[in-house]
Image (cartoon, coloured by chain):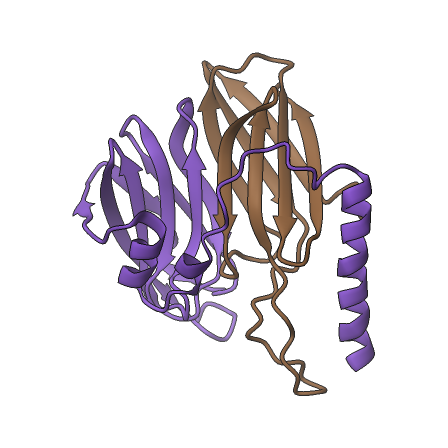
Chain colours: A purple, B brown
Amino acid sequence: MKRRTFLKGTVASSMLGVAVSAGLLTPRMVLAAWPESAFGAKNVDDALNALLGSTSTSESSAIDIKAPDIAENGAVVPITVSTSMSGVESIAVLIKENPSPLACSYDLSANTEGFISCRVKMGKTSDLIAVVKSGGKLHSAKKTVKVTIGGCGG
Amino acid sequence: MAETAIRIRAQMKDDVTEVKALMSHEMETGLRKDKKTGEVIPAWFIKDVVCEHNGKQVMVAHWGVAVSKNPYLSFKFKGAAKGDTVKVSWTDNKGGAATSEAKVE
């Protein structure tokens, strides 16, 4: 199956050619660089420092995390982070017990609401932490999600 | 491959447009081993997602390997009108990219 891995790589790299010719990679969008060290950090504090420059967050009841109490499939855990705060600049989702806790980060424009819904992978039972940057300050909330291994929810 | 790479729905209710996007992508973590060869399957995942409304960025997402396969994304923004264009584009760690548009309904 080395051939399969090789072919997968070939298909992926040929997409580059297609993408360039389709004008998709021309830098017409201002895009903050992908935060490499934040995604590589092995614990929550390091990830927050790398991503947001600080670990001082204050717990906020204005942030709501909707996620299953028990996730039957750790590979697909649906989560929704929403907040009634105004002026939300960014939302970050961290999974404390994952090998690299930072799962995803969202930069929002002025007229975009503090609401993000996505699906993440969780290696095991863990706290899901949402960090919302608003008004220059970091606010957080967390929710524990239990992950059952072995499918059928039993 | 590219036609259904991103499915988008953008629906307006009162002043808020909710965008839901479903993307086709392996989102390989780079932590799995091929069962037959024992080799690590290399990481292959969407890194950046840019969402635009009428050509202006409304949201930029940075993703790591912990985002699930065939990623789903939903967000909301204000100030659109029916018929406006919402565009979602992603780039992955191997230089792959895709983009798709939908009209606000």
Position of B30 with respect to A97 (left or right) is right
Rendered residue at 59%/76% (across/down) = B32
The spot of residue A11 in percent (x, y) is: 80, 61
Position of B24 with respect to A64 (left or right) is right
Is A25 situated above or below B28? above
Rendered residue at 35%/34% (across/down) = A89
Is B69 situated above or below A32? below
Q: In what quadrant of the picture does the C terminus of chain A appear?
A: bottom left
Q: How many marks?
A: 0
Name the image quarter holding residue A29: top right
Is B53 situated above or below A93? above
Can residue A90 be seen in the rendering of this structure?
yes
The spot of residue B5 in percent (x, y) is: 72, 45
Q: In what quadrant of the picture does the N terminus of chain A appear?
A: bottom right
Position of A54 with respect to B21 (left or right) is left
Q: Nearer the viewer, residue A114 or A133?
A: A133
The spot of residue B7 in percent (x, y) is: 68, 38
Rendered residue at 58%/28% (across/down) = B52
Can residue B2 be seen in the rendering of this structure?
no
Position of A119 with respect to A22 (left or right) is left
Residue at the outermost front position: A27
The spot of residue B23 in percent (x, y) is: 65, 46
Is B102 situated above or below A59? above
Name the image quarter holding residue B43: bottom right
